[in-house]
Image: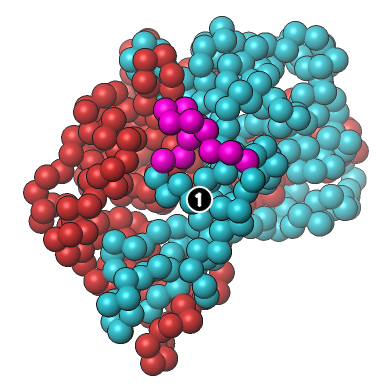
Chain colours: A cyan, B red
Amino acid sequence: MSADADPIAASAARRPPRGARHRVERMRERGAYDRAQVHAVLDAGFIGHVSFAHGTQPFVIPMLYARDGERLLLHGSVASRLINALAEGIECCVAVTHLDGLVLARSHFHHSVNYRSAVLFGRAVAVTDPAEKAAALTRFVDALLPGRSGDSRPPDAAELAATTVLSMEITDASAKVRAGGAKDNREDLALPHWAGVVPLSLVAGTPLPSDDLVGAPVLPDYLRRRA
Amino acid sequence: MSADADPIAASAARRPPRGARHRVERMRERGAYDRAQVHAVLDAGFIGHVSFAHGTQPFVIPMLYARDGERLLLHGSVASRLINALAEGIECCVAVTHLDGLVLARSHFHHSVNYRSAVLFGRAVAVTDPAEKAAALTRFVDALLPGRSGDSRPPDAAELAATTVLSMEITDASAKVRAGGAKDNREDLALPHWAGVVPLSLVAGTPLPSDDLVGAPVLPDYLRRRA
């Protein structure tokens, strides 16, 4: 396996100026700033880690998300402190990370992981239009499983009223990717240790139907493709 | 499948007082505060999302971690801004999340995911003792893959000097778990949609050896067990 074959390094998007909040400083060759790369990371998942500060106290919470163009959609109960804090338009930072492999080098020092990640900065606003809120919920369902929204009941007025949808304009963003094999020091290559990569992926198992399904619904196509 | 069979809800540890930073407010029956539950979430992974605030600006970054008793160990280059910011002892919040399944309900509204997560609060200090730093690096390697540290070269003095190890006392922590099936409204049960859970797990694929392995090292036992 070759050393880091990093498609991101070839990105044409310009590195942000020194001090910019989204500039990748460590392993800068792994950083990318063009939106297509950021979108690719976002579209490959549905769970992000959302952080905000309350005074000097930071918080970070896992949340479901969906992308809508240059906006990141989040949602939660209208009673959620977190959601309400974000809805005030405070600064928000969201990280999305996919693990792709364990990198086992000859030295402890060069052990690493392969991953794709994105870090986004922006401020959220509440989506108030009911049709826009319903469309956002459709996106959340399809982010979990493409095609699923058409095979489940859309929200009614009470469910929409119980849900706050937030829309965060992606003001600044970067992607960071590590791919490829272990990078060992030349003088370590003669060591007798196994070296290489253990690929990791999030795999869907056999779907487990609810006990109370009506009749004997067949496994839908969108689910058969995924599982 | 039964509705949320939540082992965590039975936890004996007391709920923190109102306003405590680690008190779970939403879906409180999913929250737990005893350290065994928190440790179980931490010990099942090796990537956390670390957040801190710089003025009103929050940041969140994925980082490798390892647990050492009631401390969370982090590490990075001595040149890392992030690591140096954390080493100043500012407030830090770390979330660790494992995805266990897609929960597909009859309604958009009740779609969810099964997961195990932990959120930790504390302040970090730099570990300066070389022996302690080396021991921490051993923990990071074994957090990736138990048993691996014995089959790779420990750090030399230059590598230790190039690495900052942080130790964060876990001051406050909570775990949150969702398990079990879809929870639909009674009046939705007659809908013709498939409902249930698609299990998800992070799966290791076939190890890919480096091209430049010396001789033909056999796949080590600790790797065969994992893959």
- Does residue B205 appear to the left or right of B18 in the view shown? right
Residue A82 location in percent, x, y? 52, 16
B67 relative to A17, above or below:
below
Q: Is residue B35 visible?
A: no
Along the viewing direction, whichever of B162 and B141 lies nearer the viewer: B162
Could you tell me residue B224's position as x and y percent? 45, 77
Q: Quadrant of the C terminus of chain A?
A: bottom right
Q: Is residue A24 magenta?
A: yes
Q: Is residue B191 above or below residue A124?
A: below
Residue drawn at x 43%, y 68% is A182
Of residues A116 and A74, the one nearer the viewer is A116
Give the left or right position of residue B226, taking residue B73 as reference. right
**Residue B200 vs residue B170: left or right?**
right
Residue B74: image quadrant is top left
- Secondary structure beneath disc 1? helix
| Label 1 neighbour load within 10 Å: few <14, some 14-19, many 20+ | many
Question: Where in the figure is residue B9, as x and y percent of width and height?
Answer: 46, 31
**Nearest the camera: A107 or B102?**
A107
Chain label for disc 1:
A
Main secondary structure type of the part rendered in magenta: loop
Residue that carries the numbered disc 1 in the rendered image? A30
**Is A57 a magenta residue?**
no
Q: Amino acid at mark 1?
A: Arg
- The stretch of residues the image draws in magenta is A13-25
Residue at x 39% of width, y 45% of height = A26
User: In the image, is residue B90 above or below residue A225?
Assistant: above
Q: Residue B218 in the image: x percent, y percent?
A: 41, 87
Which residue is located at x 29 percent, y 23 percent? B91
Residue located at (22% from left, 40% from top): B167
Residue B193: name its quadrant.
top right
A35 or B125: nearer the viewer: A35
